[in-house]
Image: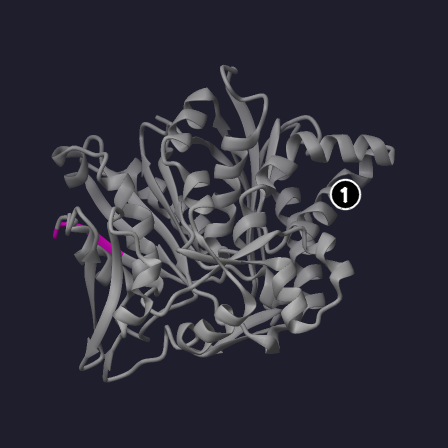
């Protein structure tokens, strides 16, 4: 029985800023914008954190399920490098505010931007041996950005948000190729989050580790899957996307052994890879949610999927530190319809675009999203102009004795 993704949604916040505005505000070299290949990045608000991002990504998926299907969610896994506590998981908050069954396994995983893919594979393995017919799992990749001028060019490429995946035995969005995967991991400090207030990154080391892991994980995939090659085995490719320029370099590296001309390489990129970069170019790096945003982007922006027969997609997941996996699955026109019904493109278009001064005003508050505080109140009224009365969203309102509290804002209330 195939397992995979039954439904997919992305929440990328309520605000964004244009990348040219970021570059101008920071006095960065405008000639480097094409290499980043981004036009906007999502910006976190003071009432948003990894819990609100996760819940706001997942609730639209659960709202479409009947009571029996909701009760069949037996596993909830959050993947994040934006943890709120060294013991208590983000998943416990998410479970509560999504109103899931108390007979549900809860788990938080951490491996930088690879975590959600590991969670997907773990969830599929659990479901394969579950005694409950129709059991489902919910995997949510959720993160916030902790970057300012110290990050240099990475500030413009770092996003904010969450990707939610409903996993089960009716994989409308992506049917996993069972046993078709390759892994490659080793210890390297290419980026890290040593405190809840800032990130550190070695850009060059991270770039080379990413490319090394792509080569190594695909080689392992080829060892497991007979006659697999990057040029003919996959009609589409979606790669973890820290920024579009790195994905373009990765594609060139993968095709180098085939001796193709530059126009042939560019044509292949435009057909098989470029559709995956449309949405990442509007949000920035969503960490472990990035690959699944890229998958959604493929499904909504590829010209040859509507009404088509099944096609195979190759996916590459990379997490700094580092761990990686190349795997594959099947998509078709049903996949397109399922993702389009979530209105991800409309959500991205509805974000409020900030100017650089507004961004600087928000930044000191959003950078404190993960700082543990015994008691705190969020000045929701100060930021309420960003909220839409017609849209139900979870917001962070206060902390008491280190326990965070949240409220639903909008017409639907709690699930």
**Residue 398 versus residue 285 in the image, above or below:** below
**Residue 36 versus residue 47 in the image, above or below:** above
| Mark 1 Cα-neighbour bin, 10 Å: few <14, some 14–19, many ≥20 | some
Q: Which residue is mark 1?
A: 252
Is residue 182 one of those drawn in magenta?
no
Q: What secondary structure is marked by label 1?
A: helix
* Magenta-tinted stretch: 102-106
Residue drawn at x 58%, y 39% is 276
Left/right of residue 166 with respect to residue 42 in the rendered view:
left
Q: Residue 202 location, x and y as percent?
A: 66, 71
Residue drawn at x 70%, y 72% is 27
Quarter of the image for residue 302 reads top right
Which residue lies most toward the bottom here?
374
| Image quarter of the N terminus | top left
Q: Main secondary structure of the magenta part?
A: loop
Residue drawn at x 56%, y 63% is 320
Q: Residue 270 location, x and y as percent?
A: 70, 33
Mark count? 1
Q: Residue 144 location, x and y as percent?
A: 43, 64
């Amino acid at each position: 029985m195939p397992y995979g993704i039954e439904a997919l949604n992305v929440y990328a916040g309520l605000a964004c800023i244009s990348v040219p505005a970021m570059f101008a505000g920071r006095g960065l070299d405008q000639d480097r914008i094409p290499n980043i290949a981004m036009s906007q990045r999502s910006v976190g608000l003071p009432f948003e954190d990894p819990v609100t991002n996760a819940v706001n990504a997942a609730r639209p998926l659960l709202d479409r399920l009947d009571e029996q299907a909701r009760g069949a969610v037996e596993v909830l896994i959050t993947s994040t490098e934006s943890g709120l506590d060294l013991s208590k998981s983000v998943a416990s908050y998410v479970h509560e505010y999504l109103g899931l069954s108390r007979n549900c396994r809860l788990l938080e995983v951490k491996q930088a931007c690879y975590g959600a893919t590991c969670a997907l594979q773990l969830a599929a393995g659990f479901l394969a041996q579950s005694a409950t017919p129709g059991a489902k799992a919910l995997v949510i990749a959720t993160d916030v950005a902790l970057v300012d001028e110290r990050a240099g060019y990475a500030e413009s490429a770092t996003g904010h948000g969450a990707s939610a995946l409903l996993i089960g035995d009716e994989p409308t969005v992506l049917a996993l190729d069972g046993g078709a995967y390759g892994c490659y991991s080793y210890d390297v400090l290419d980026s890290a989050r040593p405190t809840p207030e800032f990130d550190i990154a070695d850009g060059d080391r991270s770039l080379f580790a990413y490319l090394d892991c792509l080569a190594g994980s695909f080689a392992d995939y080829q060892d497991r899957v007979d006659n697999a090659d990057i040029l003919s085995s996959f009609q589409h490719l979606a790669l973890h996307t820290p920024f579009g320029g790195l994905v373009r370099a990765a594609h060139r590296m993968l095709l180098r052994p085939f001796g193709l001309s530059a126009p042939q390489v560019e044509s292949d990129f435009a057909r098989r890879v470029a559709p995956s970069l449309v949405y990442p170019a509007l949000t920035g790096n969503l960490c472990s949610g990035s690959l699944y945003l890229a998958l959604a982007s493929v499904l909504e922006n590829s010209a040859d999927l509507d009404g088509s027969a099944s096609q195979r997609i190759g996916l590459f997941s990379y997490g700094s530190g580092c761990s990686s996996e190349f795997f594959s699955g099947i998509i078709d026109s049903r996949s397109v319809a399922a993702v389009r019904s979530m209105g991800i493109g409309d959500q991205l278009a509805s974000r409020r675009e900030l100017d650089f001064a507004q961004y600087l005003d928000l930044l000191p508050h959003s950078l404190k999203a993960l700082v543990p505080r015994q008691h705190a109140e969020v000045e929701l009224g100060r930021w309420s102009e960003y909220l839409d009365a017609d849209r139900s969203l979870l917001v962070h309102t206060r902390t008491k004795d280190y326990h965070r509290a949240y409220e639903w804002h909008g017409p639907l209330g709690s699930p």
